[in-house]
Image: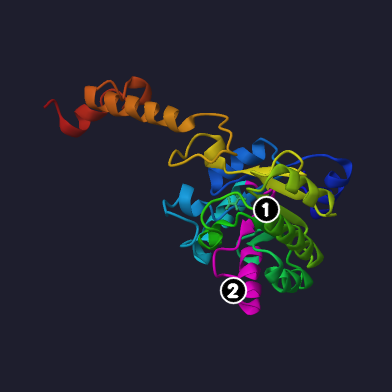
């Protein structure tokens, strides 16, 4: 059964872990739903793992909408969260208009935004008009340049304090979930126990209320780089290349198609049409 926001709250209170995985299209969403993962994130990581960009920065609203619609069709019974792409929430008006499109046109159940305390007014505006919001602090890929690259955050007292304040501000603004990316596990544990909303970690250790990873990473479909926090549960990329090599070989040596993959005609049809020639 499709999870709801009160289910996520109840899961935190009961100490029941929340699973989240990204999906970007109809087939991936169908598989994630079949595996009964609690919630799907249509992450803007799709820019890198599906569209081949170097970062998430170029991803557009139209791309997020297109992929969210496909995920919704593939996973009608799963709670779907969609990332708002870079600059799509640069002002209150833009945030309301774009989040509204992801919910109304895309079929998302909630939107996710990257940023700390300075984003609280936007989170508050969206939740007040009925758009459920997920926060995302720590390593925020859309603004990784300002953070000095893809680095673990909150390692010194000052930045750990700031992340703790950011988490509280996002919760108070009305977010119902908070993603913690690439922060030390002890800090993630403190932030988690200080909040009433669940935290979902990615590279933030076991003490978060749940975990999220990228679909292509856990299945071994993205080989450009592999962060320390990724666990590969399969090597489907390698298997896919081997399967495609077999097809290529069989086409070239004439062993595909066989009778099994070929249509035939009843006796006499060709003679009637072409005579005996
Ligand atoms: O874009 C994404 O996939 C994400 C997760 C990795 C948290 O934001």
- Provide the secondary structure element on which disc 2 rests: loop
- Which of the two discs, 2 and 1, sits closer to the camera? 1
Q: Secondary structure at mark 1?
A: loop
In this picture, which residue range is highlighted in magenta?
75-103
Quarter of the image where one finds residue 67 = bottom right
In the visual, does 216 lie left or right of 200? left
Q: Check the picture and name the quadrant holding the C terminus.
A: top left
Residue beneath disc 1: 156
Residue farthest to the left? Answer: 277
User: Which of the two residues, 114 or 32, is positioned nearer the viewer here?
Assistant: 114
**Residue, x 53% and y 39% (percent of image)?**
217
Q: Residues within 10 Å of mark 2 (few under 14, many from 20)?
A: few
Q: Is 17 on the left or on the right of 23, as rendered? A: right
Residue 197 image offset from top left, x and y in percent: 81, 54
> Residue 172 at x, y = what percent?
81, 65
Q: Furthest residue to the front?
A: 157
Kindly identify the residue that appears in the image at 55 percent across and 63 percent down. 85
Q: Nearer the viewer, residue 164 or 42?
A: 164
Q: Which residue is under mark 2? A: 90
């Amino acid at each position: 059964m499709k999870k709801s926001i009160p289910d996520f709250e109840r899961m935190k209170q009961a100490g029941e872990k929340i699973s989240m995985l990204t999906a970007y299209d109809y087939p991936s969403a169908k598989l994630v739903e079949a595996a009964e993962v609690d919630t799907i994130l249509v992450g803007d990581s799709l820019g890198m793992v599906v569209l081949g960009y170097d970062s998430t920065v170029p991803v557009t609203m139209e791309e997020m909408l297109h992929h969210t619609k496909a995920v919704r069709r593939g996973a009608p019974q799963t709670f779907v969260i969609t990332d708002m792409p870079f600059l799509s929430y640069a002002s209150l008006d833009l945030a309301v208009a774009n989040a509204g499109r992801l919910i109304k046109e895309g079929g998302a159940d909630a939107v996710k935004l990257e940023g700390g305390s300075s984003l609280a007014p936007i989170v508050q505006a969206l939740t007040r008009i009925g758009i459920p919001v997920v926060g995302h602090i720590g390593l925020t890929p859309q603004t990784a340049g300002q953070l000095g690259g893809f680095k673990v955050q909150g390692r010194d007292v000052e930045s750990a304090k700031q992340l703790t304040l950011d988490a509280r501000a996002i919760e108070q603004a009305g977010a119902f979930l908070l993603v913690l990316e690439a922060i030390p596990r002890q800090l993630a544990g403190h932030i988690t126990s200080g909040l009433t909303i669940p935290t979902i970690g990615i590279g933030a250790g076991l003490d978060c209320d749940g975990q999220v990873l990228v679909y292509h990473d856990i299945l071994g479909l993205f080989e450009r780089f592999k962060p320390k926090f990724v666990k590969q549960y399969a090597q489907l990329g390698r298997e896919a290349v081997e399967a495609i090599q077999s097809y290529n070989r069989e086409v070239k040596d004439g062993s595909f198609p066989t009778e099994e993959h070929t249509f035939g005609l009843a006796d006499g049809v060709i003679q009637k049409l072409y005579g005996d020639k």
